[in-house]
């Protein structure tokens, strides 16, 4: 049992990412019940909706689960207050300065993990007192780092720069990916895209089917001047591309995003006008399975490939 298993008291070092419009209580509890760590994605929830999901998740599992909190969230103080009141013990923070809320969370007995895309921010997170970092490579879906450092390059550099556990993310959807991440120095993995396309994910079936039919090269990291996000190519992506190529200012680009595009695409299933956030690994995802089965398949694949390597 490594430090990630011990930190979260889980059976497998596999964490389901807290993804907007995908990660409600059904997905989080399914992953936790299967022996991983499920996360509720607070980024697409009003405070009262988050509370409802936390209550339902506690009813659906007696195993550890956590919440992913984007620190740029407008109602962040209310979100943190609810997390503390509901006695949630694990919080993954992202998209912001970890020093802002880590102390408060730790003072309330909460284990804190921060998502980073560079060595610089990994060190800042460790200095802020987090318990672990998620080192997320350029391949990841949704909001991403500007550095464009790939997972294979990022993980060993972060591992060498901090003493706390490193969790790998970005382009990982299989046991082989888990094995590769551990070979590079990670002690666990955070997986988004594969769990986004599970039966328990709250994403619309149109979005899930679009992902399972996607091929290599269909995702692009865009909007780097505002808030980097990896998107599947569609009509909305073409609008963004045209705006960027035409020299649109940050305000104009933000206005494009401000029309509920992620909800429209992922949650409501509008494949033309919606923002279809997903990782590069989407090209490997060809079916929709229960989250527990996905986790078990990943672990079995990990063990099989680990055995094969040992036999070389």
Image (cartoon, helix red, strand yellow):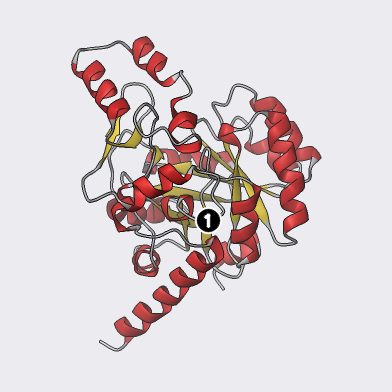
Q: Position of residue 253 (x, y in %)?
A: 35, 16
Q: Is residue 198 visible?
A: yes
Q: Position of residue 82 (x, y in %)?
A: 75, 35
Quadrant in the picture for the N terminus: bottom right
Which residue lies at the image location 52% right of the left edge and 31% below the top edge?
A: 97
Q: Secondary structure at mark 1?
A: loop
Q: Determine the residue located farthest toward the bottom in the rendered image.
A: 311
Q: Is residue 12 left or right of residue 216?
A: right
- Quarter of the figure that contains the C terminus: bottom left
Q: Write the residue at 79% across / 42% down.
A: 86
Q: Which residue is mark 1?
A: 199
Looking at the rendering, which quadrant does residue 288 occupy?
Answer: bottom left
Q: Nearer the viewer, residue 212 or 22?
A: 212
Residue at the location (59% across, 58% down)? 37
Q: Tell me if I can see residue 91 in this picture.
A: no
Q: Residues within 10 Å of mark 1 (few under 14, many from 20)?
A: some
Closest to the observer: 74 or 126? 74
In the image, is residue 184 above or below residue 98?
Answer: below
Camera-side residue: 95 or 75? 75
The reply, left or right, for residue 93 in relation to residue 47 is left
Give residue 16's position: percent from left, percent from top: 52, 54
Residue 75: image quadrant is: top right
> Relative to residue 38, is residue 256 depicted above or below?
above
Q: Position of residue 301 (x, y in %)?
A: 40, 74
Q: Is residue 34 above or below residue 89?
A: below
Q: Quadrant of residue 59 in the image?
A: bottom right
Identity of the residue drawn at 59% across and 53% down:
27
């Amino acid at each position: 049992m490594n430090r990630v298993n011990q930190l979260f008291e889980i059976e497998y070092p596999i964490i389901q990412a807290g993804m907007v419009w995908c990660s409600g209580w059904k997905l989080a509890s399914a992953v936790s019940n299967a022996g991983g760590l499920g996360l509720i994605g607070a980024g697409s929830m009003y405070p009262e909706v988050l509370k409802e999901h936390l209550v339902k998740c506690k009813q659906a599992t007696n195993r550890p689960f956590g919440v992913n909190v984007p620190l740029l969230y407008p109602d962040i103080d209310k979100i943190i207050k609810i997390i503390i009141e509901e006695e949630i013990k694990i919080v993954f923070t992202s998209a912001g300065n970890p020093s802002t809320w880590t102390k408060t969370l730790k003072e309330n007995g909460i284990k804190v993990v921060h998502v980073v895309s560079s060595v610089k921010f990994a060190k800042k997170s460790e200095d802020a007192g987090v318990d672990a970092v998620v080192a997320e490579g350029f391949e990841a879906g949704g909001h991403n780092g500007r550095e464009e450092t790939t997972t294979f390059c990022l993980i060993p550099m972060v591992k060498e720069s901090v003493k706390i556990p490193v969790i790998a993310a970005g382009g990982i959807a299989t046991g082989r990916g888990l094995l590769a991440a551990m070979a590079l120095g990670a002690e666990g993995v955070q997986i988004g895209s594969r769990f986004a396309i599970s039966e328990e994910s709250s994403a619309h079936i149109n979005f899930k089917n679009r992902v399972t039919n996607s091929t290599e090269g269909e995702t692009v990291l865009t909007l780097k001047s505002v808030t980097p996000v990896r998107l599947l190519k569609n009509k909305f992506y073409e609008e963004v591309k045209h705006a960027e190529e035409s020299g649109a200012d940050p305000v104009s680009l933000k206005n494009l995003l401000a029309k509920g595009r992620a909800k429209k695409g992922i949650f409501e299933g509008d494949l033309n006008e919606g923002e279809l956030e997903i990782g590069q690994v989407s090209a490997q995802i060809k079916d929709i399975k229960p989250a527990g089965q996905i986790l078990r398949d990943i672990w079995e694949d990990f063990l099989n490939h680990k055995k094969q390597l040992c036999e070389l």
